[in-house]
Amino acid sequence: MAQPPTPRQTTQPCNAAAAFRGLVAYIVWAIIVSLLADPLSAALGLQHAAAALQFWGFVLLAPLAAIVASRMRTVRTTPGDAQHAAAPEPEQSAQEPGDDVRYRLLVNNLPVGIFHYDTDLRITEFNDRFAQILRAPPHALQRLDMGTLRDLRILDALRDALSGQPGRYTGEYLATLSGRQIRINLRTTPVFDAEGKVSGGVGIVEDISAQHEAESMLNESETRYALAMRGTNEGLWDWNPVSHSLFLSSRLLSLLGAEGEHQRTTSDEWLKLIHTQDRARFQSALIAHLKGQTPHFECEYRVLDRKGEFRWVLARGLAQRDEHGRAYRMVGSIGDITERKRAEARLQSELRFTRTLIDSLPVALLVIRPDGTISLWNRFFSQLLGYEDEEIANMMAMRLVAPKDNALLRERMACALQQGKASARAELITRDGRTLPFDFLARSVELESETRLLCIASDISEQLAIEASMRDINRELEARVAERTAQLTAALKELESFSYSVSHDLRAPLRAIDGYSAILASDYGHAFDDEARLLFQRMRAAVQRMGMLIDDLLNLARVSRQNLQLRRVDLSALAAEIAQELQHSDPQRSVRFDIEPDLQVDADPSLLRIALENLLGNAWKFTSRRDEAQIRIGRIRDEAGEDGYCVQDNGAGFDMRYADKLFGAFQRLHHEREFEGTGIGLATVARIVARHGGRIWAHGEPDKGARFCFTLGRHNDRSAATAPPVDNA
């Protein structure tokens, strides 16, 4: 680059009037720009006031530094210019002290500190605000060596100006004279002499401690608010009712699945996303708040997300109004309440189901508050008493109770509150004045933060009617039983009389016939031929058989009338005793008895002996044609799991087709010529077993033996798991 010709330098002060006019013009320009600061800040994205102030401070203070520097610098002139300088114009030749005073007054009243320093970093000039910022008296700042500052970043900003470049520093500064830590904005600009060399610098200092503190508090508050909003899962919106512009926060866009989309839209576009069934309600709530009819805006509605699904949201907001009450801005939040709505829908469904279930109960149900009013009831209760729901709501429960039961029911309700539950029987009054009997069951329950009574009342009208009918039937049955008992008593007396007659009146003729027959056979038998003697023998046998039949009938009658005397009986020992008696009656026979030991039963000993005598006697009789007869007595368990006992033989047996006739009186399956007997024995056994609460059954085959089994009631159940089986061998 070519060097300019060396000029001749003359030093003369800057025209004070020109400087003053320049300063005034700058101040006017600064005021105009400051009025536009808010919208311009918004356009530039400066959301915070402190950030905007810092930005505009640097923009507006830079020209001011140049003006101050122009007052202190020297003017570089060429040789041609020197002549003009030697002959100044009249307005430039004279000093204008008034302008200089005004200049100094304006500079000292600026809200920023201004100072001039030379190339040695010594302060040569400064305004009052500079001394105030440093908290130092003016005389202490005269010729202050700023090179002693410890903060290298401040020194770098000062030296930048001495190198011909503007300098800048924002940060903490320790005022060495006051020892106070402050936060400053420092802007430096070089000052050139007439030769174009840097002769020093001008610095502009702004104390932004208060602004920085306010900004920190604001940032902290906004961070706290952002965290709170994130925790509540809500997004923010900002709406201009005049321009209809709408700002949506990133969180709100995220709720709609529109992350990264443009945050600015219009209220008309937002209205299109609202469900058609909710738009009218949304607009009504919004207009009411804009008109000042509600303290705040709040509305639940459905909005379409980016997936094409409607989500429930809760929108809240508050309008900002001018002095005329007109809303010019509205800010609020939106939260996703879809899950809450789903939970509410499930809850409503469950409540409807519960209500349907309660109304379907076949008993009356009601809930009573502590003050005695009815808060809940079911349809059965209202229909039974004939009241409408509107009549029952908040009705005093005791109003429905019959006067005679009022005191009782009050006492039982108090007991339920104290002990948790209580029951009572009382009558309720229907709407038409009738009384119905109820059984009450009351329980204390916690409902809506208070203890209430849940009462279940069962209508017992039919039950009482049935009970009355049962009492009538019982009385009638008792009368019939008494009548029947009297008849049976009379029949028993007749039977006893008949038995007496049989045992005495019938036996006497039989004894006479038998006796006279014996006398005839003894005294006149020699005169009879063989046929006559045979007839006499048959007659005596028939008489004896008739006597046996009478004895068996008397035993059968006695078995039916005899009272049971249950005792522990050793069935094995009793069977062995009877077997021994049978063997003594016919010692010539060869019969083997197999008796299971330790068969213990609870039975009437005399009746049990009669039964065993008949069963063992039959086995002895029907094995009489066997050379090697076998009779076994043992224990079994029947199909119902009840212990039983069997008498088994290898005798003549019987045909199972006629098994149903075995236990009837006078029933015989074998001819009298084959085996003697009256046909009463098994009937007697069946009667004895029945008297003990048991049953009897039989199995047999012709010429292969028979088995007769019986039980003696459940009180004789014992484990038969270890008992050996009784077979038909």
Image (spheres, rainbow, N blue to C red):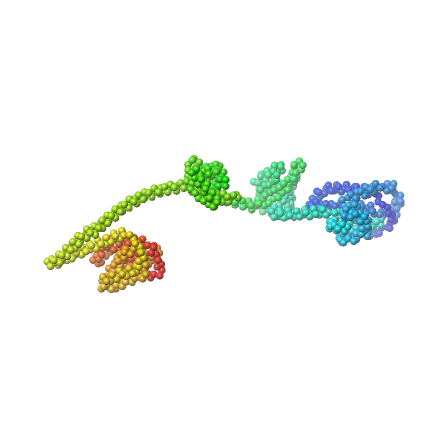
Residue drawn 75% across the image and 41% down it:
31
Q: Quadrant of residue 656?
A: bottom left
Q: Position of residue 103 (x, y in %)?
A: 81, 42
Q: How many callouts does the rendering have?
A: 0
Q: Quadrant of the C terminus?
A: bottom left
Q: Is residue 7 left or right of residue 453?
A: right
Residue drawn 45% across the image and 38% down it:
400
Between residues 282 and 683, which one lies in front from this camera angle?
683
Q: Position of residue 612 (x, y in %)?
A: 27, 58
Q: Position of residue 454 (x, y in %)?
A: 47, 43
Q: Position of residue 256 (x, y in %)?
A: 60, 46
Q: Is residue 302 left or right of residue 192?
A: left
Q: Is residue 571 above or below residue 62?
A: below
- Residue 443 visible in rendering: no
Q: Is residue 467 left or right of residue 666?
A: right
Q: Residue furthest left?
A: 527
- Residue 471 visible in rendering: yes
